Image (tube, grey):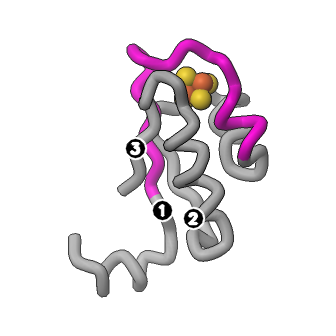
Amino acid sequence: MGVRDRKERKSMRIRIDKSLCNGCETCVNHCPDVFMMWGMYMKAVFEVTHPEKYQQRVREAADLCPKQAISID
Ligand code: SF4
């Protein structure tokens, strides 16, 4: 999917590899607005609206994840 499509979609897709995740909640603590949702439902893939608002915190959370279980499309 191209950049133009991504902008038009106005969301960001986050994937959490559950086979790697150890449940430490570093991601939840760093960006609860986004990862609390994941923590409650344990979804492996979810969409975040308003990516411009959360993108930096989500990327930081992905960097902080000790298992490198978070990927962002
Ligand atoms: S920071 Fe990584 S290992 Fe920890 S709960 Fe989040 S996804 Fe799982």
**Which quadrant of the view contains residue 45?**
top left
Q: Amino acid at mark 1?
A: Met
- Separation (CA) of disc 1 from disc 3: 11 Å
Residue 73, image x, y percentages: 36, 56
Residue where numbered disc 1 is placed = 12
Q: Residues within 10 Å of mark 3 (few under 14, many from 20)?
A: some
Residue 23, image x, y percentages: 62, 16
Q: Is residue 36 above or below residue 14?
A: above
Q: Is residue 1 above or below residue 38?
A: below
- Separation (CA) of disc 3 from disc 2: 12 Å
Mark 1 or 3, which is nearer the eye?
3
Label 2 near label 3: C-beta < 8 Å? Answer: no
Q: Amino acid at mark 3?
A: Ser
Residue 58, image x, y percentages: 59, 53
> First in sequence: mark 1 or mark 3?
1
Residue 55: which disc? 2
Residue where numbered disc 3 is placed = 71
**Which quadrant of the view contains residue 61?**
top right
Q: Is residue 38 above or below residue 2?
A: above
